[in-house]
């Protein structure tokens, strides 16, 4: 059990923004009939969906996220409208503008994320690799930085 906790700590230390990447979802259709985007368990290598949630009706100027996960991975999709996701590994930051419903951003554990600049009516869908577990969250940036040393 302790070895498992040590491995998770090591994984958080080495997680980098380069581990986060855009994923193109499988789509079908055309301009005459519309498009369907498909996400199935196993369709994204190594990612099993255990929870799905939506963020919407975000007031102008409000930012979401501002946390890291100890072991949970996420895929974040702009179902409608747009927003920016900034990923931070404690040394480097990168911002992705999300506006395509057929594209998701994989955010791995050990990465701080914040979501900003929601357009009016934006809907953010999050696919999570595990169920909600408060103990998996690192909510203070200073504590996040401590996991990186």
Image (spheres, rainbow, N blue to C red):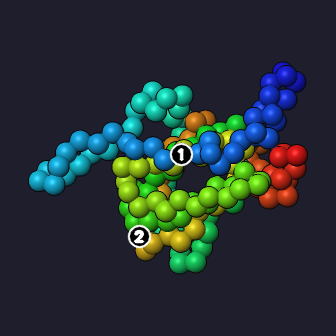
133 or 32, which is in the foreground?
32
Q: Is residue 140 above or below residue 7?
A: below
Residue located 77% across and 54% down the image: 90
The reply to whether dot 1 and dot 2 touch (C-beta < 8 Å) is: no
Which element type, helix, strand or loop, lies under badge 1?
strand
Q: Which residue is mark 1?
A: 21
Q: Is residue 6 above or below residue 13?
A: above
Task: Work out which residue is located at the far bottom of the displayed protein and give it.
Answer: 60
Disc on res. 29? none
Q: Residue 81: x percent and y percent?
A: 40, 66
Which quadrant of the structure image shows residue 86?
A: bottom right
Q: Residue 66: x percent and y percent?
A: 69, 60
Residue located 64% across and 55% down the image: 87
- Which tag, 1 or 2, sits closer to the chain's start? 1
Q: Which residue is mark 2?
A: 121
Which quadrant of the structure image shows residue 20?
A: top right
Taking the image as shown, residue 119 lies to the left or right of residue 116, namely left
Q: Residue 56: x percent and y percent?
A: 48, 63
Residue 15 appears in the picture as rendered: yes
Residue 133 appears in the picture as rendered: no
């Amino acid at each position: 059990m302790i070895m498992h906790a040590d491995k998770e700590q090591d994984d958080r230390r080495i997680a980098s923004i380069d581990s986060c990447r855009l994923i193109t979802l499988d789509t079908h259709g055309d301009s005459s009939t519309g498009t369907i985007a498909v996400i199935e368990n196993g369709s994204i290598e190594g990612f099993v969906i255990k929870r799905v949630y939506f963020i919407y009706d975000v007031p102008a100027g409000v930012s979401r996220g501002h946390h890291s996960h100890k072991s949970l991975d996420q895929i974040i999709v702009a179902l409608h409208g747009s927003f920016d996701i900034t990923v931070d590994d404690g040394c480097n930051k990168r911002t992705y503008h999300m506006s395509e419903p057929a594209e998701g951003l994989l955010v791995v554990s050990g990465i701080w994320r914040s979501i900003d600049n929601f357009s009016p009516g934006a809907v953010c869908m999050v696919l999570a690799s595990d169920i909600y577990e408060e103990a998996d969250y690192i909510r203070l940036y200073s504590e996040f930085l401590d996991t990186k040393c």
